[in-house]
Image (cartoon, rainbow, N blue to C red):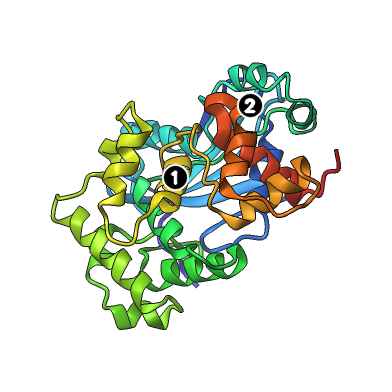
Amino acid sequence: MKFAVIYAEKLEITALPPFRFDLSCEIFANGDKQIRNYEKGRFWQVIRVNGKLVLAIVESAGIVDKPKLAVELKSNRAITAEDKENAGAAVTSLFSLDLDLKPFYETVKDDKLMAHLKRELWGLKNPTTPTVFEALVDSVVEQQISLKVAHSLEHTLIKKFGDTLNLEGKVYYVYPTPKRLASVSTEEFRQCGLSFRKGEYIKEASKLITEGKLDLEKLKKYESSEKIIRELDEVRGVGVWTAELTMLRGMRRLEALPADDLGLRRVISRYYRDGKVISSAEARRIGKNWGNWKGLAAYYLVVADMKDLEI
C-alpha cells in the first residue's frame, strides 16, 4: 500500500525549571489515541499551525531542573521555518513551559499540606488548551455531569466535527473550529450525546466568534479577572463556574478557582476537611492561603487525588 508523502521536522524546546514532563503528562494518559495521548514517555496531539494540521510528538530530553523537550513535527504539507517556530510556541503554551513555579512554591510554603504536595509533585505544570474557544466549549460540555462522561462527549464532538490528518495509514483528529460548530444543528449536537441546551450554547458562542462579535483570545490580555468573568457571563449558557474554568484552562489565569465545582470541592475537602461536604464559600476561604495561585494549587490537589496521594 502506497502512502502520501510525509514531511517531518524536529526541534528542541527549553522549559523554565523545575518541570517534570512525565508527571505533567499523566493527565493525558489513556486518552483517545486519535486525538491526544501520553504513552511510554511520548505525548502526541495534532495542532493547527498557520492553517496546516501538524502532529506534534513530544518527549523529554532533559531532567527536572534542566528541562528540555524533543519535538517531532509531522504533516502531509511542507513544514516551514515559521511553522516550526509557531509549533514550538504552541507546545510551550500547551505544557505551560514558560511558567515559573517558584513564586507559587514561595506563596504556599506556610500551608503545610500544600508545601508537602509541592515536594511530592515538584515540577508539575498545568496544561493550557490551544485556544480559549476549546476551553469554553469543554467547560460548557462539562456542566453538571461527571468528567468521565464529559470527556467521552468531547471526544465524540471532536471526531464528528473536527478536521482530520492522515499520516502513515493513521487518522488523527483536531478540535473543530468555531466556524464548523456554528454550522452544526442542535439535532447533530444531540446525536453526540449533548443536551439540547448545551448544543444551543455551543452553537451560539461559535456564531458570535465567527461573526466577529466575540473575541475570546482578546480576553487573555485583560488585567482584571472580574472583567473577563463579566464579559463571558454575557454569553448565553456561561455562568461564573464556566467562566472561571475557561479562564483557568484556556487563559492560564491561575488566580481563578472554580469553587462551584462539586468535584473540586470534594478534592479540597479530602485534603483539608477530612472529606466533609463543604460549600463553595468554604472552598474559597481555604483557597485564600494560595494567593493568586488558587487555580494551580487546586490543580495540584486534583492530581494528588488522581494519584491517590495521602498526606
- Please tell me how crowded label 2 is: few (under 14), some (14-19), or many (20+) other residues with Cα within 10 Å: some
Query: Hey, which residue is sitting farthest right in the picture?
Result: 310
Tag nearer the camera, 1 or 2:
2
Q: Secondary structure at mark 2?
A: helix
Rendered location of residue 143, percent (x, y): 47, 63
Q: Residue at x 27, y 74 (%)?
A: 184
Image mark count:
2
Whether residue 13 is visible here, answered yes or no, is no
- Please tell me how crowded label 1 is: few (under 14), some (14-19), or many (20+) other residues with Cα within 10 Å: many
Rendered location of residue 105, percent (x, y): 66, 21
Q: Nearer the viewer, residue 277 or 60?
A: 277
Whether residue 200 is visible here, answered yes or no, is yes
Q: Nearer the viewer, residue 217 or 107?
A: 107
- Please, is residue 229 above or below residue 16 in the view? below
Which corner quadrant holds the C terminus?
top right
- Please, is residue 245 above or below residue 85 in the view? below
Q: CA distance from mark 1 to mark 2?
A: 19 Å
Rendered location of residue 66, percent (x, y): 67, 19
Which label was assigned to residue 199?
A: none
Residue identifier under label 2: 289
Contact flag, marks 1 and 2 (Cβ < 8 Å): no
Q: Nearer the viewer, residue 91 or 223?
A: 223
Q: Residue at x 37, y 70 (%)?
A: 198
Residue identifier under label 1: 244
Is 63 left, or right, of 51 in this rendering? right
Tell me the kind of residue under disc 1.
Answer: Glu
Q: Secondary structure at mark 1?
A: helix
Q: Residue at x 30, y 35 (%)?
A: 227
Tell me the kind of residue under disc 2.
Answer: Asn
Task: Identify the mark nearer the N-term, 1 or 2.
Answer: 1
Q: Residue at x 25, y 60 (%)?
A: 206
Rendered location of residue 9, percent (x, y): 46, 39
